[in-house]
Amino acid sequence: MPPRTKYMGAHRPKNLKGTLVRLLSYLKPYRVRMVVVFVCIAVQCACNVLATSLLNPLLTGLALPNSLESTEQMAKEGITLTPFDFINNLAFSNNKLAYLGAVVGLMAAIYVLSLVVNYTLNRLLVAVSTSTIKKLRDDLFAHMQTLPIRVFDTNTHGELMSRYTNDIDMMNEFIARAIPQFASSLMTIVGVFTMMFIQDWKLALVMVGMLVLMGIIVKFIGGRSKKNFVAQQAAVGKLNGYIEELTEGQKVVKAFNHEELSIEQFDKINSHWAEVSARANSYANVMGPIMNNLSHFFYAGIAVIGALIAVNASNPLEYVGIIAVFLLYIRNITMPIQQIAQQINLLFMAVAGGERVFALMDTPSEVDDGYVTLVNAQIDPDGNITECAERTGHWAWKHPHADGSVTYTELRGDVRFEDVTFGYEEGKTVLHDVSLYAKPGQKIAFVGSTGAGKTTITNLINRFYDVPDGKIRYDGININKIKKADLRRSLAMVLQDTHLFTGTVMDNIRYGRLDATDEECIAAAKSANAHQFIMHLPDGYNTVLTRDGENLSQGQRQLLAIARAAVADPPVLILDEATSSIDTRTEWLIEKGMDALMEGRTTFVIAHRLSTVRNSDAIMVLEHGVIIERGSHDDLIAQKGKYYQLYTGMFELS
Amino acid sequence: MIRKLLKGAKGYEVPSVFTVLLVLCETALEVVLPIFVANIMNTMQLYSLGDVLQQDLIYFDFYNAHAIVTLPKGTFIDGTVLLNTVYTYGLLMIVCAILSLTFGALAGRLCAVAGAGFSKNMRAKLFAKIQGFSFANVDKFSTASLVTRSTTDVNYAQQSFMMIIRTVIRAPAMLVFSTVMAFVNHPDMAWVFFVAIPALGIIMFVISTRVHPLFKSMFKKYDKMNADVQEDLAAIRVVKAFVREDYEEAKYRNSTEAVRQANLKAEKLMILMNPLTSCVMYGTIITLLVIGGIDIANGEIQSGTLTAMMSYCTQILSSVMMICFIAVQLVMSRASIDRIYEVLETESDINDGACPDKTVDSGSIDFVNVDFSYSGNKDNLTLENINLSIKSGETVGIIGGTGDGKSSLVQLIPRFYDVYDGELLVDGVNVKDYSLYNLREGVSMVLQKNVLFSGTIRENLLWGNKNATQEQIEAACKAACAHDFIMSFPNGYDTDLGQGGVNVSGGQKQRLCIARALLKNPKIMILDDSTSAVDTATDAQIRQGLKQLSADMTTIIIAQRISSVENCDKIVILNDGKINAVGTHEQLLASNSIYQEVYRSQQKGTVEQGGDN
């Protein structure tokens, strides 16, 4: 097996701008709608700020002195009410109830507009975000299908999986919530400050000063909190690791009467975690009340300073309304300010997630320069090959040449390796000068320890990994010239890990050839000796298998995998440890199925168990990537070499 | 459910209770603030209009009296009165804010302590409980599920607990306090809240209950979608080998589309929440403004009172929303708490017997008409009518196919499982009468799926006997053919094994497990397919080593290989949960068809590798 390189996802994005642009480019098809969304957000913020601001003229207007002369006096002094003179005149003409009605009516209208806009923008946003995320997922998955096996070997499934779960979820969160909320927070803050400065620049400056203070405090606490969270993460890892290990080994714990000691050990780790976690969470928990109460300081500050200004002002009445509005403004911006830090964090996380997703999308696909294709063929008695559309049971390699001519070669299953040297990594050779040939219909076996290079050979035959030109030939054709899909269609693999799919038994067998009829599938199952147990399943061939066929025994799963290969009906078969997880007696029972499958096909068998390979036409004993012995069973026994040692139990494979 | 949560806080009652009290104080302080502002603003308005006081005004006179002064209503307000009022109430506000901040911050700190303590307690309880579980208990839950319950679920429960002691108290308290203050402030307006509160509650309740099943169904589709990826990843070689990339892609597209639609459906309903709740909020504000505005126009109240009312409006309605939000959160975390308690409330079904002092002395074993079923169901017996007598010091081999009940049979001896029917005697005493400790001290078992723990080789071996000397350790390792390879490591017995013993090969791991079991110096030794990854020569050597180390030890060997059992005093053939035959190698080879089959299948090449179940 090739080595795994540990991929550690960075938490901070490396290329913030590039990734962000690319992420946003996914929104391009919806750009009109996104523009509408942002306009809606702006309108909504404006509505909220304006509605709040109207409180000032409302209160001032209502508080105007009840005598007509003094109000006229005030009007002359230029007291500011609403921007609308016809409404203001109601107040100045001392028709206060009408004025109240007009201003409240205006507010109500603004509120209604804000509600409509809110619904519209959210409606657009869910449509855009769900479609965008679907597109992202589909693109990622589609690209992943084209990746070379190497990528799957060097990344754990968990790492790849987290692209689909954590990373894409984070991006969804980004599009559906972070962008609009960030925009809204920003616009609200800008809007509120604009209005503050319009209404009273002195108090507005006081607010700015207080906010700077708030920012400093947040930054201070945030920094300490982060350090503690890192410590907590480590403690959690240790704690969960212990729980996992001991729970998995619980039977051993019982067998050794070790319960007391494990609990003792656990209590230590658990207590340490509690300490660290309490410290880390303290900072986070303290942040909320601090922010909340800071706003009360602002509250008091604005009231006191406002009152002081008012006492010395020429027209103190104005300040009543201004203070009232400022108090509401404080309420309006406390939330956005608290959240904006969180939203920026979310943005970073989404971009980091996006970076990982795009990195996978940018991983180069399998290279396929092959141009030789596999076609259905009719072969007349003279051996002439003609291409045809329908399935005939015969196939040919269609080989177009540079001069425009096309030649056909019958698919027979002749595989040759010529001095193949290969390594998964630069400088680490796994196979050294391996030469071998398999004539059509022959059974070739590979025997050797883990890491000797057995699986590597099969990885090269189906081009999961590529070797330099001309080293491997299939029916005389350099396999690098064969289109990968066609090459693989001509081979069937049965692996040690069977991997069944969620679906019925019939679906799983049909996976070998999608256009196979039910009858063909059943025939394949019968030939693999699987029919009998399938009929005993609750719904026979329609029994639904879940989670890799968890309700089947290892042997039964293996039989289904063999049936799946049988229905594909290819000329070449690769059995990679296909029977290693079955006990000898069960293997003996399925052997007939295997023999039927191998009949007339070129077969490569990899096995630990020598009983499986004994009747092969040729057995290759591999050690450290070198074929050290080759020959039939009898030849090798007679040689009294490694194979003989293995066979007699003097040496064990590992 | 809250009661269950609170039970977990044992030992952390003080921080928990103080969190609640501090949060209450913080809330109370927050609620009086608008009244202070109202006083300032009202006085300002009266001052600027040159009006007289409409009710008594209390303030601290900073300029003249330097004492608390009550100004009777009807008094004219001058600049000094205004400044005094502003200073008095401004100072009060700052004091309140400082106190409130202190309380809030302390509550946050204590809540973190209580929360971590809660989580620690829950986890410790779970861990101890799981340690006490019988094999059947563990099987019922599955190991993976027990791990999830001890980690993820405890986290969720901790979050809920922290939310309860902070927010669950805070939101209703805020609601009640604010409503009371609203009435104190201006009873004529406060009735509006009696319409607004239920309206808001109903809207949130109706939408939440409708949205919940939609999201649940979405998450189900979401899980299915991720399962598709997982399946594809696991089977990527199969996918590529059969050239099924397009097929998988189409399958995944269907899943993502299903998720998209389900998500859209749920979100469409969800996005109604904001406009509808805002509608109530705005409606309340408008109503307050109209009523308050008329009162101001008539000179009955001043702007400050109306502004305070608006503050209470925000506080009241946001606490209603908070309550609904918490309710939803609690419902969601309920599943986690239930899953934790399901474990905590499960009693181990295997407990100490009536003779706690009885120890295993000779090591004879008798199965008398034993039936066994994992599901406790007589129609689904794994072992049926087992009668078998093993004398002290005998070596017995057991042969059978996958699923024939070999492991089940031996796991009954140290009472990992209890028999369904019949009796199992060790030393002539029913195993159910021993204390579990004494029984398991006497019986050593090398499990088929064996585990080494992170730590050094020595630490792992000491599991067998924590007081073992270096000589004893080496003797056991020599018998298990482990000494030589251990010594070949640079650090010898102090070599670190890594988690799950990843630094040794399969065969080495098996030999370490055997040595660990030997250190217990047991009367009965059971090897459940424990040498499958060891070559036949070493296998034979280990068997010899066992005999030498302890000649009178009863030994049971389960094996796939005939060679592992052919020298046993007797060999038991299990087939489909029943004893098919008992005899020596020669007897069975002559008369038993299953034994002959196995023998023949292995004659073609007897060497095999581990991994057989």
Image (tube, grey):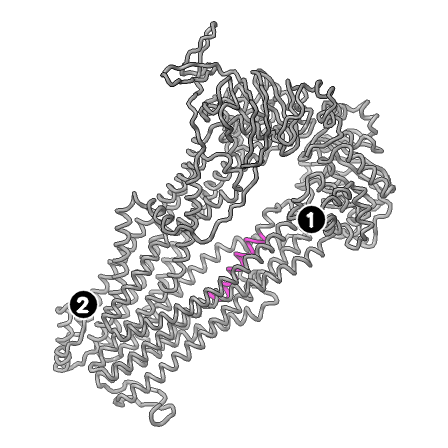
Q: Secondary structure at mark 1?
A: loop
Q: What amino acid type is highlighted by mark number 2? A: Ala
**Badge 2: how crowded within 10 Å, few (<14), some, or many (20+)?**
some
Between residue A551 and residue B243, name the one nearer to us.
B243
Which residue in the structure is indicated by mark 1? B134
User: Can you tell which quarter of the image residue B571 is in?
Assistant: top right
Q: Nearer the viewer, residue A120 or A485?
A: A485
Instruction: Indicate the position of residue A232 as horizontal and vertical percent values.
Output: 55, 60
In this rendering, the answer to whether A373 lies above or below B565 is above
In the figure, is residue B134 to the left or right of B94?
right
In the rendered image, the residue lying farthest to the front is A427
Residue B121 is situated, as x and y percent measured from the top left of the image, at 61, 61
Rendering coords of residue B230 (x, y %): 50, 39
Instruction: Check the picture and name the quadrant holding the C terminus of chain A.
Output: top right
What is the chain letter for disc 1? B
Same chain for mark 2 and mark 1? The answer is no
Q: Which mark is residue A102?
A: 2
